[in-house]
Image (spheres, grey):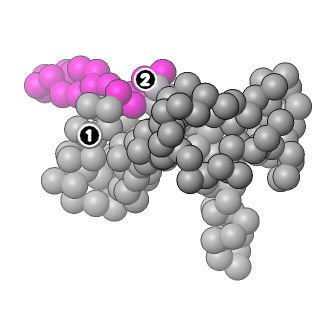
């Protein structure tokens, strides 16, 4: 199997999934709103307060995350009050959990202060800390140096006559 990176100049990343993901969640406020959604925050005022942003910024980010399909607005009404909206994670939003977990894990290791991480996510059944892990579809944990880059169906080849695949 040949690593696609050896022929890096033969293909383009104009169709980059990382770039597209960052267009959706690539700012601090969006990531912190998603953190709060995973911690159970649902109401607009609570997002603004817990993230430490003003209402206009909270409204803009919640609107973007809702339009991108990570959150959905759900109506609720307290007795004697007007209908308001809470935000809840969609399936697309719940699938973002691994990203949040990996970012938190990296931050715990490389960016926490001298006191250590502020929270530890634990497995409900046994209490052990939960970690993001790279795993192949056959169930093997993948360590650094044990993977290669292969052509995906959306790869844009700069030489359209090149149909060489590095997969086996």
Residue 123 makes an appearance in the image: no
Percent position of residue 50, x then y:
38, 54
- The label on residue 126 is none
The spot of residue 140 in percent (x, y) is 88, 31
Kindly report the distance in space between the C-alpha atoms of the residues bearing marks 1 and 2.
14 Å
Foreground of the two, 136 or 32: 136
Front residue (pair 93, 55): 93
- State the image quarter where residue 82 is shown: top left
Look at the image and give the residue range highlighted in magenta.
69-91
**Which image quarter holds the C terminus?**
top right
The label on residue 90 is 2
- Tell whether position 82 is magenta: yes
Q: Position of residue 128 (x, y in %)?
A: 84, 42
Task: State the residue position of label 1.
Answer: 64
- In magenta segment, residue 43: no
Work out whether residue 134 can be spotted.
yes
């Amino acid at each position: 199997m040949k690593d696609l990176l050896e022929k890096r100049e033969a293909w383009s990343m104009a169709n980059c999934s990382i770039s597209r993901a960052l267009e959706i969640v690539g700012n601090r406020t969006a990531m912190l709103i998603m953190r709060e959604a995973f911690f159970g925050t649902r109401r607009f005022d609570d997002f603004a307060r817990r993230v430490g942003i003003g209402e206009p910024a909270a409204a803009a980010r919640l609107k973007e995350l809702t339009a991108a399909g990570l959150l959905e607005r759900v109506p609720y009404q307290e007795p004697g009050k007007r209908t308001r909206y809470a935000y809840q994670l969609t399936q697309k939003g719940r699938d973002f959990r691994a990203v949040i977990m990996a970012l938190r894990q990296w931050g715990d290791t490389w960016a926490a202060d001298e006191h250590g991480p502020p929270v530890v996510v634990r497995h409900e059944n046994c209490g052990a800390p939960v970690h993001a892990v790279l795993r192949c579809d056959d169930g093997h944990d993948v360590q650094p140096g044990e993977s290669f880059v292969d052509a995906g169906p959306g790869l844009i080849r700069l030489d359209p006559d090149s149909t060489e695949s590095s997969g086996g």
